Image: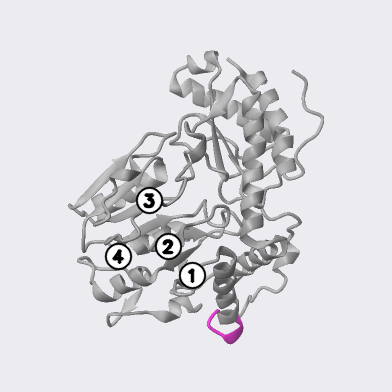
Amino acid sequence: MDKPSSRPSNPCFSSGPCAKRPGWSPAALADAWVGRSHRAAGGKAKLAEVIARSRAVLEMPDDWRLGIVPASDTGAVEMALWSLLGSRGVDLLSWESFGLGWVSDVRKQLRLEESRHLDAPYGVLPDLAAVDPASDVVFTWNGTTSGVRVPDADWIAPDREGLAICDATSAAFAMRLAWDRLDVVTWSWQKVLGGEAAHGMLALSPRAVERLESTTPPWPLPKVFRLTKGGKLIEGIFEGATINTPSMLAVEDALDGLRWAESIGGLDALVRRSETNLTAVTEWVDRTDWVDFLPEDPGTRSSTSICLRIVDEPFAALEASDRAAVVKRLVRLLEDEGAGYDVGSYRDAPPGLRIWGGGTVEADDVRALLPWLDWAYASVRP
């Protein structure tokens, strides 16, 4: 098979950190608040602006709190788990590695005995109807390593007694979140808007704030997890007074991504761009015999972390380690050609491909990548 004649203009398809927005350059950081205290008026204004613009683009309800927290999405989820769980039972949903990580934290670190683990293998969702509305529930909106997303939040009871805690790091800004069915939502800057890492966002509903102010966790809380003082929410966290020192270069980059999102039409445009990328891959998969989606149900296929499995019979007949080796050779070929970077599946996922299709990725670049995938697989086919 001949090499394709053209390459993507931007060959970055990593699922995190993700592609920068179209036209980005380091010049976007020229106005960064560097060399000054983040607690000075200018620094606090920058942080507050990230919060305000994020709320606006995501169309977050006015009565929700939103804050910048340490340690990326992981830090935001951990803060929620350690600060909010323990007063009632909890249902833990997993269908890929990050969801399994939260299960491990709750069961092995917090050691909550009153918990249920609703699990499913890569490619499918667990039984969402089995979630108990009297319990808290912890889940990922979009499984970054499996490419399986929840189709909606109708399975979360509107009159639930428990809190719905949602890791939305690869969904926020690319998928519409059902704020009325959620109580905690987390994400990080390096996903859909292509920002830099190390900072997380924590959004709390009024019900979550009520839990924080009325219940004391039965375990000690590290300083970076503390959201209350004297039984009251630390409001400063949600006004730009961060718990620890943030990178003001990363803050400026986050603002650049948010301003770009506003300039193209906000959430509607971001969702549309991501869905267009999924459509481009779907059309290719439909006419390609060696590859298929990892998610079995088309209604649960992610538009951001688009996960694919190789179904070619010679490949499928190999041992798992040999399949992984074939994928590594395929990925290396693409990188050597400058045609596509970081498109291998996550290390814990079945050997295959993962193409990031978030809003910063141009559909033309996705379309330009796909012939290279055909060429690379033909080159390494067992």
- Select label 2 or label 3 by which is in front: 2
- Is residue 76 visible in the rendered image? The answer is no
* Element type where label 3 sits in the image: strand
> Quick check: is 31 in the magenta stretch?
no
Q: Earlier in the sequence, mark 1 or mark 2?
A: 1
- The boundaries of the magenta stretch are 37-42
The residue at the point 56 percent across, 49 percent down is: 16
Residue 327, how many percent across, how many down? 56, 27
Do the residues bearing badges 3 and 1 touch, measured as CB atoms within 8 Å? no
Tag 4: Cα neighbours inside 10 Å, few (<14), some, or many (≥20)? many
The residue under label 4 is 84
Disc 2 on helix, strand or loop? helix
Report the residue marked by disc 3. 139
- The mark that comes first in sequence, 3 or 4, is 4
Q: Amino acid at mark 2?
A: Asp
The residue most toward the left is: 113
**Residue that badge 2 annotates:** 180
Across and down, in percent, residue 34 comes to: 63, 75
Considering only order in the chain, which callout, 1 or 3, is on the residue closer to the N terminus? Answer: 1
Task: Please give left or right for residue 12 compared with residue 47 in the image.
Answer: right
